[in-house]
Image (cartoon, rainbow, N blue to C red):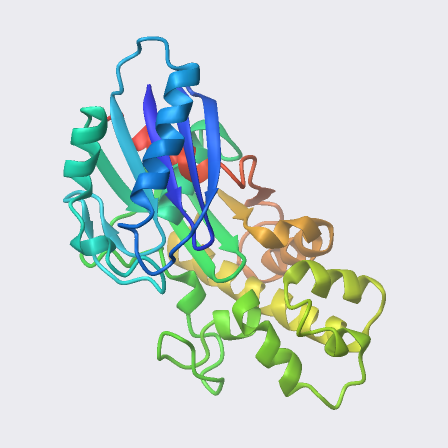
Amino acid sequence: MNIGIDLGGTRIKTGLLHEGMIVAKSIVDVTDSGSLASELPGIEKSIQDMLRKYETGKEINGVGIALPCLVDSDNNLILSDYVKYRDAAKLDLADWVNRTWGAGLIIENDAKAALTGEMQFGACRGASNAVLLTIGTGIGSAVIMNGKLLKSRNHLAGNLAGHMCIDYRGVTCNCGSTGCAETIASSWALPERINSLHPIESSYKRETIKFNDFRSLFEAAAKEDKLALKIEKDCLIAWSAVLINMIYAYDPEIIVLSGGVLGSAGRIIPYLRNEIDKCSWLKKNNIQLVVAQHPDWAGVMGAAWLSRI
């Protein structure tokens, strides 16, 4: 039995993995986004509740935690601050895990954990070379090459697709760089994108304060809203550019798309498929483009699976 914990910005997901299946899972809301220390009691309680209900004397073999930041998983080090959980790097999470469950700890970047989950149990099972792209509040990514998670000297490789520059004359990103993909095609950038296009008359613009997410954007585009169609097209072009950059860099056999945007996969996948076939220098359909099989739980599954080692 292995425990997986996926630390999201607004929700924390936990699960018990046994023989390749999640036998129990739980979601708790984040109460203090500035402090992971304040969230640990709630995480611990949710896991203990699951163990009391579903555990049958099985030993906890390991605990995996997926974090939305750069991670040195070989040394269990958190390398960068995230906009939330800024105290995470200062916490002795290994000690907390050992005291609570008598098990070892593995920490990993959340996108890498999600790709591991999809590789072991989901959409890219059996693949040796794969890319995961998560699209939502931001744009995250991870890469598997020759059957192994891609790791690099500074743990950047394959992890920062959202901060690839695709418009060097663009606006400043929240990371400090210019023209990152996230400035065009992430949900955090939607309000500014909408307001910057004010000359286009749109019912969507009038609702932007209330509805500034991809679901409402694609719903408005489906109704031929002019502003929504413009922003939708910009997002599709940006995501295509990111995917083509990832193809040139990592030469995957399969690309897995995940994240909140997949509720509109019917509008997204055909466009991306066409752009990949046009621009990747490869034969048509050389690369599979698929939707994540476990978009909500791959991070938990991957973190738990990694902790077994």
Q: Residue furthest right?
A: 223
Looking at the rendered image, the quarter that the C terminus falls into is top left
- Residue 243 spot, x, y in % from top left: 51, 58
Can residue 261 be spotted in the picture?
yes
- Residue 229's quadrant in the figure? bottom right
- Residue 183 spot, x, y in % from top left: 50, 75
Residue 224 drawn above or below residue 301? below
Q: Tell which of 257 and 22 is nearer to you.
A: 22
Left or right, 181 with reference to 197: left
- Residue 204 spot, x, y in % from top left: 76, 73
Q: Tell which of 90 and 222 is nearer to you.
A: 90
Left or right, 9 with reference to 213: left
Residue 153 drawn above or below residue 123? below
Looking at the rendered image, the quarter that the N terminus falls into is top left
Can residue 146 be spotted in the picture?
no
Residue at position x 81%, y 76% in the image: 203
Instruction: Say how many tags the image has.
Output: 0
- Residue 16 spot, x, y in % from top left: 40, 25
Residue at position x 25%, y 26% in the image: 62
Residue 133 drawn above or below residue 84? above
Residue at position x 57%, y 63% in the image: 240
Residue at position x 14%, y 37% in the image: 95
- Residue 206's quadrant in the figure? bottom right
Q: Which residue lies furthest to the bottom in this view?
A: 199
